[in-house]
Amino acid sequence: MAFESTNPSIIGLANKSWEMNGLQAAGQLMNGLAQHTTVLYVNPQPTYADLIKATIGITNEVDITRTYSAKSHLEKIGLSETASIYVLHPRPALPVNWLGSSHPFNWTRQINARRLMDDVCAAMRTLKIDQPLLINMGQPEAGLNTGKVLGEQLSIYYLDGNEAAAPAGSMAEKAENMFIAQADALITNEEHVLTTKKGIARHAFLLPDGVNFDFFNQAVGLRSIRQTIQLSWAARSKTATRRVAGYIGTVDDRIDLDLLLYSINHMPNTDFWFIGEIKSKRVDEALSKLSNVWLAGDHPSTVLPEMMAHMDVAIIPFHRNVQPSQTALVNEYLAAGMPVVATTFGNMVDHIDQIRLAVDEHMFFEQLDEALYEPYFSIDQGIDLARQHTWNKRADQFMSIINKLTSYHSFAGLSRLTSLAV
């Protein structure tokens, strides 16, 4: 579906700054939407502690120049030759965590919400935005404390299932559930979230993650010249006699350690690279002592294509009961022109003809060994498949959901609508 010229302007109320959202779902969805309509991305209010850390160089999560600016907290960021996104750097929030009494806590929180909405309204006037579509991305408390002061047509709660869920029974979970019930619709990228939350939402939709195709596809061109690329971020260099199996993502307890160790121990001439934040002490301790394993840790997203260019095959060695579908990770690997070996977890229906699947450790080892030396899936077909799942296409599907909601919104007593977007 193509966007119409009458598409409403969009305000995205984010729980992460534009600088930190990078390749994550919320930021990429906003990028896709900005190709066709005006998008105002609202960074979360920084705390005064955040400003101090940014001033002395401890963090780069806050643009202190924009936050302190007396002229404009609004920044225009070019995404392409024809598209831009506007990022709002709001004034800092008053501290609330130290307030023990519920009344001062709630009162201060309401003040912060009003300050935030004042900043948003000022940006709306500058951009001439009227009756926008409001997308709340992980800011349920702000949503509960602001009401419909922006004059929005619809209020959507976008819940990224890849982020850590609010602890059961916590105030954060209660606030989230209250806002989901209040919003016009819930849209999520994970089936398990849809199953869990659709009972409290007015309408609920599944919109799987897309892929930043052009970004990851850079690895294809870099691979042809990879021997000339200086691996400034690596303590080792890849030789022609050693192959590399690579994983990009959080190193946590989703990883089937026994399955992984079986392949690592049976493939001493293959290097295993793990690029991403290490969150599992058990996995860290088991892998860090192995000579053919490199736990690279977290790296800026800008170097990922270069790192992927040095990999011969991509692996997803998850436990089979892992809930997230991770199809976005598969699409990123395919866009980079890499063979993929994965365990049979989640929903791989769209990709079953382009990746190697394994049900146990021995089969995973065999599939990985064959993928390294005898690839039989077409790299070009994998790239073409990834191209079908771009964030621009997800943005089209998002707006088809909005059109569906708008069509039914005027009917009183409409029953809950739960649907797959794709």
Image (cartoon, helix red, strand yellow):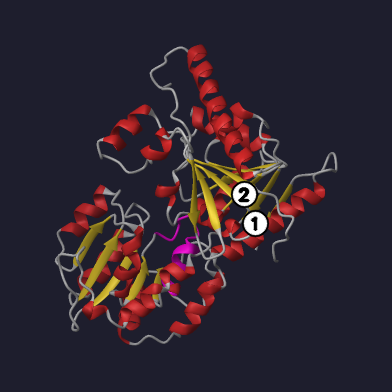
Q: Is residue 19 left or right of residue 402?
A: left
Residue 14 sits above or below residue 118 on the image: below
Q: Secondary structure at mark 1?
A: helix
Question: Residue 187 bears which disc, if any?
Answer: 2
Residue 266 is situated, as x and y percent measured from the top left of the image, at: 22, 74
Q: Residues within 10 Å of mark 1 (few under 14, many from 20)?
A: many
Q: Tag 1: residue type?
A: Phe
Q: Nearer the viewer, residue 351 or 26?
A: 26
Q: Can residue 19 be seen from the camera position used here? A: yes
Mark closer to the chain start, 1 or 2 = 2
Q: Is residue 181 above or below residue 239?
A: above
> What residue sits right under mark 1 in the picture?
398
**Residue found at the far front of this picture:** 71
User: Where residue 109 appears, x then y in whole percent?
Assistant: 51, 22
Magenta extent: 319-334
Q: Residue at x 29, y 59 (%)?
A: 257
Q: Nearer the viewer, residue 149 or 387?
A: 149
Q: Where residue 216 is drawn, which disc sits there?
A: none
Instruction: Please say if 121 is above or below 196.
Output: above
Say what secondary structure mark 2 lies in. strand
Q: How many marks?
A: 2
| Distance Cα–Cα, label 1 vs label 2 | 9 Å
Instruction: Give the side of residue 290 with respect to residue 390, left or right.
Output: left
Residue 323: percent from left, percent from top: 49, 54
Image coordinates of residue 110 in percent, x first then y, are: 55, 22
**160 or 119, which is in the foreground?**
119
**Residue beneath the point at 34% across and 61% down:** 302
